[in-house]
Amino acid sequence: MLVAIGPTGRTVSLEARDMIASHGADAYPFTEETLKELEKKYDEMAKGWPEKLKHALHEEHELVLSRYRNYYCDGCNEEGHTWAFYCNKCDFHLHPKCALEENKETKEDEAKEQNPTKEGWKCDGDVCKKA
Ligand SMILES: [Zn+2]
Ligand SMILES: [Zn+2]
């Protein structure tokens, strides 16, 4: 049996149960300090992520960055935890990495188009020479 003691008593115990579900041994010992540390770690993870985004897999609604203990990603069908991009109307979840991957590719493609590497070069078949 798990016992977690903190000033907020019951809340900490409930939170501790969530921690063990998603973190196993990482979350020991369950003190207020540990929970704060984990919160900080979670916030660090989410740094630079948008709060909301639209994704090609779910064009109807915005997906909102939410804390999740456990879910199944509707993009890759793998289990996920801690953070998800979530639509509460449809119960649709995406891993942050799945949700952000596509956006990143789009940006890279745009960058490529804006910076053609062949500029200043003359190509004759397979051979390219600096002009
Ligand atoms: Zn995924
Ligand atoms: Zn939806």
Image (cartoon, rainbow, N blue to C red):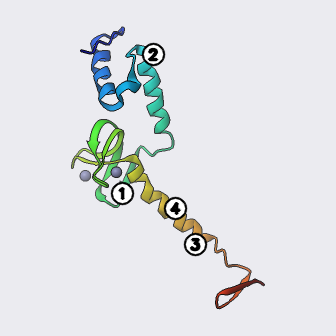
Percent from the top left, x then y, of residue 50? 45, 46
Q: Residues within 10 Å of mark 1 (few under 14, many from 20)?
A: some
Q: Quadrant of the N terminus?
A: top left
Q: Are marks 4 and 2 in contact (CB under 8 Å)?
A: no
Q: Quadrant of the C terminus?
A: bottom right
The quadrant in which residue 79 appears is top left
Q: Are marks 3 and 4 in contact (CB under 8 Å)?
A: no
Query: Sequence order check: which comes first, mark 3 or mark 2?
Result: 2
Q: Which residue is mark 4?
A: 107
Identify the element where label 1 is drawn: strand
Query: Sequence order check: which comes first, mark 1 or mark 3?
Result: 1
Percent from the top left, x then y, of residue 105? 48, 62
Q: Which residue is mark 1?
A: 55
In space, the residues marked 3 and 4 are separated at their CA atoms by: 10 Å
Q: Residues within 10 Å of mark 4 (few under 14, many from 20)?
A: few
Identify the element where label 4 is drawn: helix
The label on residue 113 is 3
Q: Which residue is mark 2?
A: 33
